[in-house]
Each structure stands twice: as C-alpha cells, then as structure tokens.
Amino acid sequence: MFDGPPAPELDPAERLARLRLARSRRIGPVRFQEALEHFGSARRAGRELPVAPEAEIDREEARLARLGGRFLVWGDPDYPAALAALADAPPVLSVVGQSALLARPMLAIVGAREASLAGRRFAAELAVALGQAGFVVVSGLARGIDAAAHEAALSTGTVAVLAGGIDQVYPPQHDSLQRAIAARGLLLAETPFGSPPIARSFPRRNRVVSGLSAGIIVIEAAEQSGSLITARLANEQGRDVFVVPGSPMDPRYAGSNTLIRDGAILVRDANDIIGVFGKPQRAPQVTEKPVQICVDTPTAAVLEALGAVPTAVDELVRRCQVSAAAVAEVLLALELEGRLERHRGNRVSLI
Amino acid sequence: MFDGPPAPELDPAERLARLRLARSRRIGPVRFQEALEHFGSARRAGRELPVAPEAEIDREEARLARLGGRFLVWGDPDYPAALAALADAPPVLSVVGQSALLARPMLAIVGAREASLAGRRFAAELAVALGQAGFVVVSGLARGIDAAAHEAALSTGTVAVLAGGIDQVYPPQHDSLQRAIAARGLLLAETPFGSPPIARSFPRRNRVVSGLSAGIIVIEAAEQSGSLITARLANEQGRDVFVVPGSPMDPRYAGSNTLIRDGAILVRDANDIIGVFGKPQRAPQVTEKPVQICVDTPTAAVLEALGAVPTAVDELVRRCQVSAAAVAEVLLALELEGRLERHRGNRVSLI
C-alpha cells in the first residue's frame, strides 16, 4: 500500500540538523515542516534559528542507545512511509525493538481502558487473526483493549506507541508487557527521552497510532471517549475506520454505534477487515501459541477458562491461578444464575 | 405518507365477486390481481372461472361477525393503502378490533422468538416511544420480541398480523395478549377463518407485517432467522429497514449485524427512527402507564425490578411474583458476582 522506491539515505549533516531542529523550543511537527520548506533544508534552518545544541542530541542518542534504541528522523529510509505522509508527521521517532516491523502493513486496534472481558477477548481474537493474516498490530499500550491487542499480537508483531518518552513505563502495571514488546515487538515514542507522559501527549500519541496504520479498529468506545478522537483523526488522515458494534443498552458502545451510524465499517470478525485490504504478501511465521489475555477478577478468570465442554474443578483452580475457595464461590454464583451445569467427577461446564 | 383522495366505495356486487374470487382454489394474491386485470373486474372473472360459491362467503362472514370482525377487500376505502400497493397484496383481510388504526402510520417491530430479556426490554422501550410519537406498532404476535412490542404498544395502538385464520389462537400462551389486542388494538389475518397456522403461512404473514408498515425494526436476528426474511421482503417492498446492533460475540445478533453491514439503518434509540419519518400529525392520547413486559425466570424478574435506587426485598418479592426463597437465591448470586449492593432496612440495589 505504501510501497515505492526506497528513499535515499539522508546526508548525515542534514540528519543531525533535523534532530537539532526537532528538539528546539517552539518547534512542533508542523513548524518543523514549514522550516524545512522555507529554508530548503534543516542545515540552512539551523543557521537562522536558535536550534538545540549538538551536545543535547548526543546525550539523548546515547541514553537511547543504552536502551538498545535509535532515532528515526523524518526522511530516513526506514521512517514509516504512511506516517511520513502526514502534514504533522513527527520529525523524530525514538524506537526500541524490532524496527523491521515498520516496513510491514499495520492496523491499529484501540478502545476503552475500562473494557469488558468480552471486549478484551474480542480484541485479542482480532489481533491474533490479523497477525496471522500478516498485519502488524499497533496500539497505545493503555489498559483494556490496547493491552489485550498487544499481548495477543506479540508473536506475530506489534507496535506500541507511547505517550511519554521511550524510557517511561506507563501505565505502571504494564511494565512487563512493555518489556516484552521492546524485546519482541517495537516501542515507539515521539516525545523526547525522559519526558513524562502528560495529558496533552495522549491525543498526539493517538494521531501516531492511526498515522502508522492503514486502518483502525475501534472496540468499546463510549460517548466522548478518547477512541472517538482517534477515530476522527484516523478519518481525517484518510484511514479506514472499522468499528465493533454493541448493544445500544451498553454505554460502552454508545460511541461505537454512533461511528457506525455515521459511516464507519461494521466489524463482525477479522474477515470484515482483511476483506478490505487483502492479505499482505509476506505473512509472518507464527512460532508460538497465542498469548492468553489477562483477566483481573476471579469471575472473569473462571469464565475465561470455562466452556461448553466439562472441565474438572481442580483444573480450573490451576488454570485460573485463583484460590479453590474463590473458584467455588464463582461456580456457585454461576449455578444460581442457571449458567453452570455440574457433571460427574467434579466437572463443570457453561450452559 | 400514504395519503391521497379517499377511495370510492366498491360496488357491492363487485365486492362480493372479489371475495368469491379470493376464496377460490388456486387463486393466490398474484393470480387474483392478474384475473382482475385480464377480465377487467371480479364479476366478469366470476363468469369465466370456477369461483367459490356465495354461500361459502356468507358462512365465513357470519363466523367472522360473531367474533366482532369483518372483511377488508382489496379496493375497499379502508383497505390499508401501503399494503394495497404491493404486487402480491392480500385480496382479502379479516380484521377484529380497532380498524381505524389502519389509517395511521405504522412501523413494524420484529425479532427473535428466543429473545433475551434485554432484547425484549429494548423492543418494549422502542414500542412505547414510537407509540407516543404517533406510530401504530405492527408485529406478528410471536413469542419474544413480537409480544414485547405488542404489549408495550397496547395503549397507543398495535396491529397483530396472524399466520392462521383470525379465530386461531397462536401461540397458545398468547391467548390473553391476543384477546387484549382484539379489544384495544387490531387483529388482522390474510388466511380464511378457521385455517390453522401452517409453516408456509409464516413468511407470507411476514410480508403483510412489512407491507403494512413504512419501515421495519429488527431486534435480535440470528443468522438464517425468519426476521432476516422479513427484512429482505421489506427491502424489496421499498420499506426502510432499521436494525438494533449487538455484540459480534452474541449469535442472536449475527444476522442483525450483517443487515447493518449491508446497508440497513443502525438504531441506537427511537429517535433514530422518528428522525427518518418525522412525527405523525395526530399523536394519540396516552391514557395508561406503559405495560410491564413479561419476564419468565426468577433472575429475569428480579433484574427487571432492580435498579440503581435501593428497593426493599419484600417489595421485590411482591412485584416479581416469585417466592421469597427464589428472590433470596437470585440476590445472593448477584451479590457473589459483585453486581448487588445491600442497604439498611433490607433494601438492595444494582451496582
């Protein structure tokens, strides 16, 4: 989709000048592009404007290198082409991990932090199917939908776009997920090394999530949610917006349903997305079994492990990593609701 | 929408001839119209074709009159205009009840017999809102969505289209609902008096449901469900098709979501429907409180009665018409799930 002749390498002096221009005060993405256009190059811009000192760039690059990372400068051959085409493309990206992922077609999965178990499970299913079809799954490493999508796509390829600097662990409970993505996927940040994630960084991060991607998939967007902002940005960027519908009685889908009503593409399963783009030519080798998604209450863990096929209660306790008493309590509740069937040999199944 | 100059009264001899032609063997709706066109009138057709004897019509009309009903013949001034315009309009309708309802704008609500409580509740909410906006709610008197819609629209106006003859009680558990509609709404049947409802009558009944209506609203249509057939018929008839979305993980919405994907109008609430048609000029007087919808398990009954405002457990037992022990069991289950909060004075609320 974004193929073309490979871009030539940037002249090293121009590349350094772009880094210095990008890290200057009062130079955002749009003014960066304006300066390049006005002066013809970052080198000439640097002669006229008060740009960041070379030592500051060296210091940041050294800290980044200690994390195993590097810069991608706007104009570098491996700067992602789809993102580079935006009027407000980030002048500099910091990346840690498998940057080869950026050459593959990407799709974003975004949604609610306070997502339901069903929503997270659906995000994981889509991420697995899209990964197996050859797409890299992009998201924002937030709780809920984002984390479920990243985890499920770890083995096929996932890119996490951070709101803070590439070294910032956020949210704290995703420390190990963030490490796993740094090792097997790719972490990517627009803000400089060391910058804490602040409120206004999140919508800017969202434009990078959609900007990297050929399309975005929205799961559980309430009214006035951040995912709706991402959907609007994606639409403005010319990206396809795919939306998973939900009951009008569930406020977690109020924004989602409005997006569909207003023309977004309804998603029933991954084929509704793959059908739009076709399968990328180079599907990745899938070497590992799909990652189990996190579940955070005993009820959720037990429901996750239960199915129509009878399962031994002991097996449930082991798989759910929850106390036997907690499992028993959940099973009792399900039974009282008429959702659980008991079988011989202390086995249970969902009705 | 279907306004125009009032149709002239049919000549009594032609009207009787149409009844005799309609009740003849091998004459369906399409051949009825062909015969009228070919011979110029039913009277002339009756001279050439072996039509039903007058005595048979008299007998049916007498039986119908004993139920308080009458015939509406294609061409009668009060035969519904929208239905009359179909190429396969029923030649004769039997009606019992408030036939003035047929002059008002109608919307159909259809959906699954095995509907969820949430689906039935949503059907009832839509029916109340559409009724208050001035629309007559049409449906097929089936279990589930149909019954919820009829019940909720009893006080504002509802038309039940039967698959069997107008005297046939079907399904048996809707005996009292059918009586209530005969008294306060309208029962309508295409098949002759005394005909039992047989399998092939149901899709034919569905074309009448949509044919009467300016649009149909589909709630909980699984794959390959009857509601999908109704939606297809409605679309062929040029009626607007409105669909309530649901989770792709809920098979009760598989057909619904496909309809939306293929261009049906997504419904978030009644305003999404009213906005398309505008409010009819003559909104009915609403004289009664909305009818409570049927619930059929203790859990459903208790959930129906519970809300965010604390309710006394005694009050729940009384309102749910369920034993105190059953209510206590349901409350325990909800509590174990973390969905119930207990308050002083033996009161409870949903979280």
Image (cartoon, coloured by chain):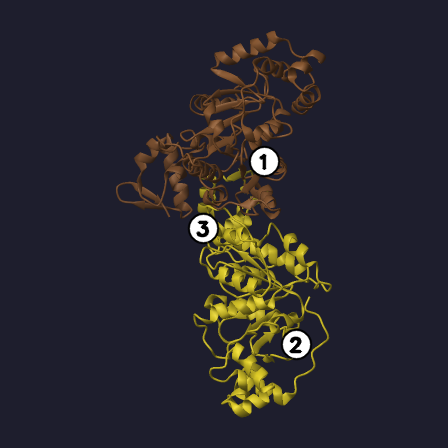
Chain colours: A yellow, B brown
Which label belongs to residue B227?
Answer: 1
Give the amino acid at mark 2. Answer: Asp
Q: Which quarter of the figure is the C terminus of chain A placed in?
A: top right
Which chain contains the residue that carries disc 1? B
Q: Which of the two residues, A315 or A182, is positioned nearer the viewer here? A: A182
Give the amino acid at mark 3. Answer: Pro
Residue B171 can be seen in this image: no
> Label 2, on which residue?
A78
Which chain contains the residue that carries disc 2? A
- Contact check, label 1 and label 2, Cβ < 8 Å: no
SS state under label 1: helix
* Residue B7 pos. (x, y %): 54, 25
Give whichever of discs 2 and 3 has the lower sequence position: 2
Graded by Cα atoms within 10 Å as few (under 14), some (14 to 19) or many (20 or more), the crowding at tag 3 reads: some
Residue A127 can be seen in this image: yes
> Label 3, on which residue?
A251
Give the amino acid at mark 1. Answer: Ser
* Residue A319 pos. (x, y %): 54, 53
Q: Which quarter of the figure is the N terminus of chain A placed in?
A: bottom right
Q: Which of the two residues, A116 or B183, is positioned nearer the viewer here? A: B183
Residue furthest bottom in the image: A47
- To the question of a shared chain for discs 2 and 3, the answer is yes
Quarter of image, res A8 = bottom right
Residue occupying the point 40% across, 38% down:
B304
Q: Is residue B126 left or right of residue B228?
A: left
